[in-house]
Amino acid sequence: MIHALVCDDYEPIASLIQVVLHNMGISVTTAGDGKQGLDLARQLRPSLIISDVDMPGLNGIELFKALQKDTTGLALIPFILMSSIDRRKAAREAGCNNFLVKPFSIDEVRHMVVKLLIEEKDFP
């Protein structure tokens, strides 16, 4: 089964993404910050991670960088960052090219998730 990790300190966004993914047949775990997200990624080894950029403590870009340094395969997990357009450059400089600009549509989320999971051959 496909499992996603959604990291966002703003619960309404995390819940919206959770519903969208559930409707796609994807199970979801949520984390309220990057530190919790990193711990859960190590524990659950999800098929996909979607993270807000601006969170307290460990932000989404720092979470992405921490996973890229991991030697146990976590760097291979498809990763989507989401934030305002002005954070896109920082995400790309960190090496994350999958970026959702807030506000985003449900269709944009679905499209990016399907694209990444098909590339990873995790989606029928």
Image (cartoon, rainbow, N blue to C red):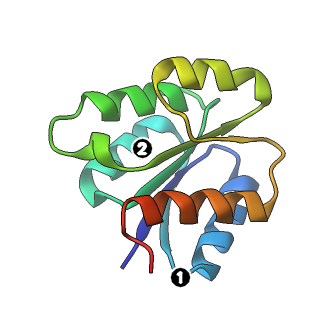
Residue 36 shows up from this direction = yes
Q: Which of marks 2 and 1 is in front?
A: 1
Residue 87: x and y in percent read 69, 23
Foreground of the two, 118 or 113: 118
Left/right of residue 45 with respect to residue 99 in the rendered view = left
| Residue 4 visible, this orientation | no
| Residue shown at the point (59%, 79%) measured from the top left | 24
| Residue 83, label in figure | none
Disc marking residue 36: 2
- Where in the figure is residue 94, as x and y percent of width and height? 48, 21
In the depicted structure, whether residue 107 falls above or below residue 81: below
The 10 Å Cα crowd at callout 1, few under 14, some 14 to 19, many 20 or more, is few
Instruction: Tell me the kind of residue under disc 2.
Output: Gln
Would you place residue 44 above or below residue 38 in this image? below
Q: Name the residue under label 1.
A: 25
Tell me which corner region of the image, top left, top right, bottom left or bottom right, holds residue 121.
bottom left
Q: Dot 1: what SS?
A: loop
User: Which residue is pictured at 52% across the width and 40% down the height?
Assistant: 33
Q: What residue is at 74 percent from the left and 57 percent from the top? A: 108
Check disc 2 and report its element: helix, strand or loop. Answer: helix
Residue 30 x %, y %: 52, 58
The kind of residue on which mark 1 rests is: Gly
Q: How crowded is mark 2: few (under 14 residues within 10 Å), some or many (20 or more)?
A: some
Q: Mark 2 or mark 1: name the one nearer the start of the chain.
A: 1
Give the x, y percent position of residue 36.
Answer: 42, 43
Q: Tell me: 68 left or right of 73.
A: right
Q: Which residue is drawn at 43% across and 32% down?
A: 63
**In the image, is residue 53 above or below residue 113?**
above
